[in-house]
Amino acid sequence: MNCAEGTPAIKVVDLHKDFGDYPVLRGLNLTVEWGRLLVIFGANGSGKTTLLKLLATQYRPDRGEIWVGGIRRSQDPVAIRRIIGVVAHQPMLYQDMTCQENLTFFGRMHGLDDIPRRIDDVLHKVGLEVRRHQRVRTLSHGMQKRLAIGRAILHDPPILLMDEPESGLDQEALASMGDLLRMEAGSNRTAVMTTHNVDRGLAWGQEVAVLSDGVIAYKADRDSLDEGRFRGTYLKQIEVAP
Amino acid sequence: MKEFLRPVFLVTWKDILLELRSREVVIASMVFAIMVVVIFNFALNVTPETVDILAPGILWVAFVFAGVLAMSRAFVIEKDQGSLEGLLLCPVSRDSLYFGKMLSLFLFMTVVEAVLLPIFAVLFDFSAFSFTLIGVILLATLGFATVGTLFSSIAVNTRSREIMLPVLFFPVITPVIIGAVETSTGAIGSSVNVIGVGRWLQLIAVFDAVFLVLCPWAFGLVMEE
């Protein structure tokens, strides 16, 4: 899998990112150990999506360094893309291709072997087996989101990056996504996800963090978390957010 | 090399599949180009004496504007459906993505030109089966696709992308258009100046070679953020 052993799954040191005159991340430091599910909370514009895009090699940092799976971002971004799966706001799928065609295309782009078996497995996991020959355009938003998750885990990446993966999902889809995440957590996969929903984030995450003023303002293990204090801190961040 | 070519052909295959289903690019460009040729045929009184002078210009106006129409769609589907991000997240070099998109644009433009050329030859009464003419069409189309893919990827991220693409594209591609018109004049005309045609073909070939190196590099920078 090309991941350096003995290193954290994700390590971010002194990360800075500006958009024009507006600084989004200001010296952010973060470490995520292997097999953990970190949920990041933060107000709108706090830089959650920017952080995930930096981890996913979609943005170049202005300053600081990122290691994903022990691989330095500045040295080999292609190798990082091989070991991550990304779920973003948009499904990142081709609307005029079927579910199977989309997964086949992305599987081949990842240079995977045994693609038909992997597609069967993924479609089973996301509950879209009967829709495999249906064009993405004809699927509901929730189903497209599930297929997007399927695309993200098709190459069995050890690290998952998910930006508000639950947005727009109905209760049934949310429940199945929670099941899927728990199943994935059991498979020793590392995941970083962002959300605005405190209850859901606390239910799904093993670690929680709050992003504020361009840095990680709070980070704690779920088991040792003082929930009242956390909620107070997070809600205060939202109130003071511009 | 195989690792580089695999995503190139995959991206092209994907674009062809999507085009076969949507028929957005080739049909629209073809109809537009045919209309240009037909309108010019009626607007200008083209006689056997003036065909050498007028036909090459009309042919390349049709090809270039049809090409711009095709280019303007090259990244729109990717952008509008958010699939460009998915493509950029694949563990392949930006160069191979660029060449995949460039190859599909080249193929779409070549299909349009292959249909348009015989129609044009019938309307303007000249032989379309000239090796020089076919050669210059392929070389110039390669130049259009090379530069057009890069500028299309830039324009798609701007608010006024329909305006931005021709504004960026035409100043850069002008040497190729001039060379293509001059070479076509020699190929369509009765008196072929072999030395003149050869020099223009060389110019287009050098342009293609230079931009086939520059554009993938610039594409990598454009796609970074």
Image (tube, coloured by chain):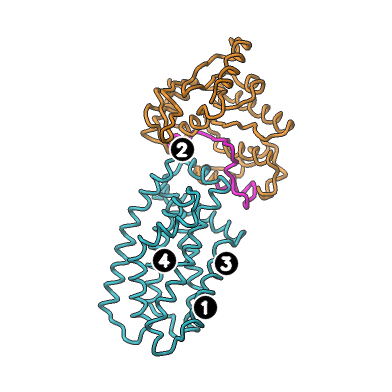
Chain colours: A orange, B cyan
**Mark 2 to mark 4 CA distance (whole Å):** 31 Å
In the image, residue B168 sits, relative to residue A182, either above or below, namely: below
User: Where does residue A241 sit, x and y in percent of width and height?
Assistant: 54, 23
Label 1 to label 2: alpha-carbon separation? 46 Å
C-alpha distance separating marks 3 and 1: 18 Å
Q: Residues within 10 Å of mark 4 (few under 14, many from 20)?
A: many
- Relative placement, left or right, of A43 versus B105 is right
Number of the front mark, 4 or 1: 1
Position in image of residue A120 (x %, y %): 65, 41
Residue type for callout 3: Ile
- The residue under label 2 is A58
Q: Which residue in the protein does label 3 denote?
A: B27
Query: Which residue is tagged 1?
Result: B39
**From which residue to which does the magenta span run?**
A79-105
Residue at x-position 67% and y-position 30%:
A177
> Label 1 marks which chain's residue?
B
Amino acid on which the number 2 mark rests in the picture: Gln
Q: Measuring from the top left, give residue A157's x and y in whole percent.
A: 53, 33
Callout 3: few (<14), some (14-19), or many (20+) C-alpha neighbours within 10 Å? some
Nearest to N terminus: mark 4 or mark 3: 3
* Residue contact at pointers 2 and 3, CB within 8 angstroms: no
To the question of a shared chain for discs 3 and 1, the answer is: yes
Disc 1 marks a residue whose amino acid type is Ile
